[in-house]
Amino acid sequence: MSLLERTGVAMTPGNIRTRKLSTAVVLGIAVAAVALAAVVVFGLGIGNWVLVVALGGVFYLAGVYVAASRVEGRRAARNRTWSALIHSACVLAILPLASVVWTLVSKGMERLDGDFFGSSMNNIGARDPEGGAYHAIVGTLEQVGIATVITVPLGVLGAIYLVEYGRGRFAAAIRFFVDVMTGIPSIVAGLFVLSFYVLIVTPWFNDGRPGFSGFAAALALSVLMLPTIVRSTEEMLRLVPGPLREGAYALGVPKWKTILRIVLPTALSGIVTGIMLAIARAAGETAPVLLVAGGGAAINFNAFENNQSSLALFVYQQAGDASRYAPARAWTAALTLVALVLILTIAAKLLARRNQLTR
Amino acid sequence: MAKRIEAYNVSSYYGSFKAIDNISMTVEPKTITALIGPSGCGKSTFLRSINRMHEVLPGARIEGRLTIDDQNIYDSDVDVTAVRRMIGMVFQRPNPFPTMSIYENVVAGLRLNGVRKKSLLDEACEKSLVAANLWNEVKDRLDRPGAGLSGGQQQRLCIARTIAVEPQVVLMDEPCSALDPISTLAIEDLMFKLKDRFTIIIVTHNMQQAARVSDRTGFFSIDKTGDPGRLIEYDDTQKIFSNPSEKKTEDYITGRFG
Amino acid sequence: MGDTSPRSAETGTGGTLTTDGRRGSAGGGVPPAHTPDSPGLGGGGGLPRRTRFGMESGFRVLTLAAGAMVLVIIVAIAVFLISKAVPALRANTENFFTFNGWSPNGTEPRFGIAALAFGTVLSAVLALLVAVPVALGIALFLSHYAPRRIATPLGFVIDLLAAVPSVVFGLWGRDVFINPVRDFSVWLNEYFGWLPIFGGDGPFGRSIMLGALVLAIMVLPIITSLSREVFLQTPAMNEEAALALGATKWEMIRTAVLPYGKPGIIAAVMLGLGRALGETIALAMTLGITFDISANLIENGGNTIAANIANAFGEANDTGRGALIASGLVLFAITLVVNMTARAIIYRRREFRDSAA
């Protein structure tokens, strides 16, 4: 007698058949679970329909597990229960996310008018229903634009170093800290620029007073964007096939020229994707802007002097404003911000699909 | 333990693509059957149909009857996991679980089936490794990762893992194609030894191997790319390699066919 | 290849790239790292020599400088935060690490991060407790359960959600999500009020629970997409091995997918933790902002280091700013440790995978 026959788990053609839990029974268990939950909840008066659904879900899982282990065996029952749990995780996560989208659109539509995009908050009192985010949009565009101009060359060159030149410990250290830097909280980036640029550098030019400005915000955003761009560019450059480089070297083209003329153009669409994702993330940052840009209600085109606002900061400020017109402005600004960020993200992802370099 | 396998008009599909067409064959217990043929002729697909691994790929389905001791494994009330326990499979590339030790790899199937008792697991582990001609090489390092073994050892570890759950049939999908000649020889030796206990079906690209190890040989072929694979000839190995009845078989054996 | 060690200028005069040499010197402001080599072997031949300030080395140094910027910035963050924090810490009349309260703006500054650090860790841990199981469930659904038709668009949506700014989640939590959470808190208080974490007499709503749940929703997409990647990388041959042994789908996941993905999951959770610890605006908008160490989850209250910086910055004077920077330094240190741990795990896993292949 073999080992498994002794333990009773050997398989023979005689016992490969199994009974299956029919769909009707599963549906029956579902109905019974909800009914039982309703009876318990309303009978004891301990809650409303939300509790009925939650309790019904628990009853259903337990019921299916018991029924399936009797009909199909314990292993199949466990399989079923985990599958149900995994599916319910999806439903559970989609509910709040759907709520975010729904509120964003429904509340954001209220002030979605020309005035909102054409005026600032200058001279808008608590009782004025008007006011807009023009100044904030200007701020966001300028700050993100400056940050992009700073980080793109730095980030791309840094990635080139890591892929093409970097060897040994120093490059490994840079790579490691690039990864670590992606995790720096945005508020810390804001504090850094505050302590370095706003409180130390600007007073030299400003009669000793700290100078809050859009440029300071751009610096903080740069700190956040740089590691993302280095990382995504590095990944793209690594995808460029080695023979392409070797082909150029064999023709006597110097390395730097090979990199600029052959490697970079090949990886270009992937690099641009990474840059756009970094921009999208930076455009939504509030904390660093709050610390170093100074806010401000009026339109200020000069990012290097005086206070500037940004869309994200505008949302935050309006959300904390006591005026009864403020929430509508906050939601419309939030909708605008999300639209801006999502358009950038989606465009980046579509561009990534056209990328011919794949892993 | 070994059982007879019969296929009646088996056709397999990937979505709308028909991979094999109307295969019928009988495999006797305690024999080694080799399936040979050019690439893409559907021999692996047929092999994977025998333990219902074919349907793991999305869109894959099958028509016809496949029985083991007159039980159709494609009946709707058949438990797929039971079929796969009864019909074990060894893959082309050695695939021990990378996170598990040698010991854990061997008893993985038993643990899945609810065997928890240490003494039973130890016994099964030793028995299977001995049967797989691997015991002497690894008995002192059972707790080391299975992925640390050489390719040939890994493949024998996978065979030990497969026979630990005591299947009736062992399917081998080109088990030596990733191995060096010495390891290949070790696996072939092992097959002769396992023949006493199991029905073995092996897919191979290597005709010498088919001629060396098998009792019966099936030759699969396709007319042109995109056509389904068909079973051209199925006979005693000796006959196939000395005096095949089909012209196509002869062409393939003698190397006049791609 | 890698060694383009610059030769001395004298040996390079015969170079053909004279114009390049001039331009390269502009970019190569950093002195060469190597000492000049002796003239090349077989010197005096007709072959062109490497130029010291050639375009090649110039470009190399330029990229090196760009790469080194990252290290410079990390060090600069630490240095400048410390330089601004120290004066404020000197002026502090209480113990910075144990005092519960934040009044740094008076003539006798008193501030400490005890309550803030407690709130930061509590909200982040709670958020992960909620988010991790759900995120792993969704990741498994996307990688192993859903048909491709559903998995691809759903994965896309999850990636998009990771891009939604935190201020939007904060606004939603403050205006919308607070209502069901308040109802739930009242219910919990009624039936489970005997538990200290659900006790109290209200008001409820702007609590640690609201903050932690909003945080959970925010880190969910990050953990989901990272662990989905890891699950998708499970070698198909290991999954087939498990199935061929007669495993059910869940058993296959337990035997092949989860053990293989474990280091990746841990790293994803750590990255989520880093994100949750550093989150500012969403918590500044949803927490009740108090300064006590309390395990009560549902009463108005709760505060974190980052949220406090956002809230207290507006009224801060010089010492106040220094105090906030000091608290930010602590946050920086915590997230640095968390992130470095996560990255170390990922790096080890990468080596493990390469050697196993």
Image (spheres, coloured by chain):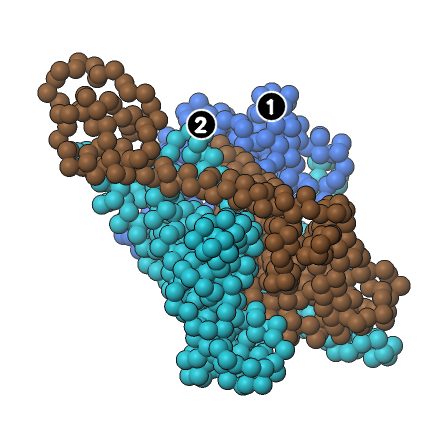
Chain colours: A cyan, B blue, C brown
Mark 1 vs mark 2: in front? 1
Secondary element at image label 2: helix
Which chain is indicated by disc 1? B
Residue C5 seen in this snapshot: yes
- Subunit ID for the residue under disc 2: B
Query: In the rendering, at what x and y percent does residue C46 appear?
Result: 10, 20
Residue at 63% from the left image edge and 45% from the top image edge = C87
| A233 and A93: which is toward the camera | A233
Mark 1 sits on what residue?
B138
Which residue appears at 85% of the width and 64% of the height?
C199
The earlier-in-sequence mark between 1 and 2 is 1
- Relative to C35, is C249 on the left or the right? right
**Which image quarter is the N terminus of chain C in?**
top left
Question: Looking at the picture, does residue A232 appear above or below residue C163?
Answer: above
Q: What is the spatial separation of the Cα atoms under label 1 and label 2, in whole angstroms?
A: 19 Å
Give the percent coordinates (x, y) of residue C3. 31, 26
What secondary structure is found at the residue carrying circle 1? helix
Q: Which residue is mark 2?
A: B184
Q: Which residue: 71% across, 30% down?
A: B123
Compared to A27, does B15 lie above or below?
Answer: above
Numbered label attached to residue B250: none
Q: Residues within 10 Å of mark 2 (few under 14, many from 20)?
A: some
Q: Please state which amino acid type lies under the numbered disc 1.
A: Val
Badge 2 amino acid: Thr
